[in-house]
Image: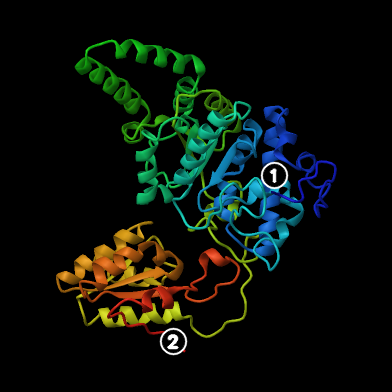
Amino acid sequence: MDSSHDKNAKPRIPTLGRFPALDRVTYPSDMRNLSVEQLKQIADELRAETIDAVSTTGGHLGASLGVVELTVALHAVFDTPADKVIWDVGHQAYPHKILTGRRDRIRTLRQPGGLSGFTRRSESEYDPFGAAHSSTSISAGLGMAVAHHLRAEEDPSYHERSVIAVIGDGSISAGMAYEAMNNAAVAGPGAERLIVILNDNEMSIAPPVGAMSNYLSRLMSSRKFMGLRELAGKVVKKLPAPVERTARKADEYARGMITGGTLFEELGFYYVGPVDGHDLPQLVAILRNLRDTDNGPILLHVMTEKGHGYQPAEKAGDKYHAVAKFNVVTGEQKKGPAGPPSYTSVFARELVRRAATDNKIAAITAAMPSGTGLDAFAKNYPDRFFDVGIAEQHAVTFAAGMATEGLRPFCAIYSSFLQRAYDQVMHDVVLQKLPVRFAIDRAGLVGADGATHAGSFDIAYLGCLPGMSIMAPS
C-alpha cells in the first residue's frame, strides 16, 4: 500500500503553479469527473512535467512520452487501484507514477532512496505487479483476473474487477506473452475481465491508422455491437456442429480482414483496433466501452509514437529510449568526463577483429545490439549477425544449433536476462558439450536500474554447471 495515500494531504510539488490542471490531480480519482477537454490539458501538462523531471534524473523518456494520453485515459476511465493496470517492463510508467500520488518524488527517480525506474509493489498500491524484465504482464494479469473471480465466488460482497495489461510490440514478441494469450481463452471464469493493450510504437504489425479505423474500433467495442454478436453466438450454438464452426470462423475472419487482428482472434481474444494512441477522446470512448463489457478477453491495439510531443526525441534515431540528464530546450544530453574504454566496447572491437580472419564466428543477441556492443559487428558482418528479439531461450538454443554445424557462435546477453534461458544453457549447451561462448554484459551491480537489472548471480548459477568455464576481467 502507498503510505502517502492520504487524500487530505497534497504532496509538495516543486513545479506548483506551472501546470494548473495537473496541480489539481493528486490521485486518479481526481480525474474521473473531468471533461475530455480538461483531460487533454492534463495530458499536455503531464508530458511537460515528465520531460522536465527526466531532464534532471535521466531515465527512459521516449517510452513514457509515447503513453501519456493512454495513461490519462486509463486512470480516468478505470477505477484504479481497485481495477488493476499492469505496465509490462515498467520503463514507460513515469506518467503513471506522477498521476498516482508520486509527483512530489518524481525527481528522485532512479536515485538512492528515491522512486524506482520501474513499477514496484512496495512503492504504491497503484503498482499491482513489479516489473523490469519484459513480457510478464499478460500472465500476471490473467492470474489476477481469475483470482478475482474465485474471490467473488467465496465472498458475494466482492466485485470482480477489470485487469489491464499494457504491453509493447517488442515485448509481445516473446514466447511467454503468447503462452499467456494461448491460456487466456481456456483459463475459465474471470478471464473475460482481462484487457490486453498492445502499445505498438514501431508500426511493425498494423496497417495505417485513420478515421475509418478509429470509427470501426469504436463500433466494435460498443455494447450494442457486442450484444448483437452475443445474440448471434447463441443462435449459432443451436446449429449443427459443422455449420457452427463455419459461422464462428466467418465472424473471426470478417473482423480480421477489416482490422488486421486475425492472429489474436485465433488465440481467443476479441480484437479492437488499431487506434491512434494519441487521440485522447477516442481512447476514452473505446476504453469506456471495453470497461462495460464481459465479452473478453480483449486485445486493444493502440498505435503510438515513442518520444511523442518532444521534438528532440521524435527526431532522434532511438527516440530518446534511455537518456542521461539533458537540456530541455535543446535536448542535448550531458556527458560525463571521458573514461577508459568499457568492457562492452573492448569485447565488440575484438570480436570484429577476429571475425575478419575467421568466417565461422557468428554473433547473436536478444534485442540488445547496442547494449552488448554487437551493433558494431552487425555493420561489418551483417550476414553473421542475428538479433532474435526478446527471446533469450531461443537465442541460446539457436546458438547451440549453430555450434553443432561447426560455427563459433558468440551469444551476447545481459546477465540478468540470461537467467531466463537457464534451462537452455544447461540442457541444450552444457549437457551436449557444445562450444557456445556467452558474452555476459552488465555483470555485477549496475546502479540506477536496481536489483532487477543487477548481474549478481551469474557466477553462482553458471559455476555449478559441469564443463562451464567462467572468466571475468579483473
Q: Which residue is mark 1?
A: 99
Question: Residue visible at 41% across and 65% down?
Answer: 419
The answer to which image quadrant residue 347 occupies is bottom left
Q: Is residue 90 left or right of residue 138?
A: right
Of all residues, the one furthest to the front in this rendering is: 154
Please determine whether, in this image, residue 259 is positioned above or below residue 405: above
Question: Residue visible at 63% across and 31% down?
Answer: 77
Q: Position of residue 243 (x, y in %)?
A: 22, 15
Tell me the amino acid under the disc marked 2.
Answer: Pro
Please determine whether, in this image, residue 78 is positioned above or below residue 418: above
Q: Position of residue 169 (x, y in %)?
A: 42, 46
Q: Position of residue 429 (x, y in %)?
A: 25, 70
Q: Which residue is mark 2?
A: 473
Tell me the amino acid under the disc marked 1.
Answer: Leu
The CA distance from mark 2 to mark 1 is 44 Å
Please determine whether, in this image, residue 325 is positioned above or below residue 300: below
Question: Residue visible at 27% across and 80% down?
Answer: 467
Mark toward the start of the polypeptide (2 vs 1): 1
Q: Is residue 299 left or right of residue 43?
A: left
- Label 1: element kind: helix
Question: Residue visible at 35% across and 66% down?
Answer: 422
Tell me if residue 329 can be seen: no
Tell me if residue 429 can be seen: yes
The answer to which image quadrant residue 39 occupies is top right
Please determine whether, in this image, residue 49 is positioned above or below residue 388: above
Q: 343 or 138: nearer the eye?
A: 138
Coloration of the structure image = rainbow
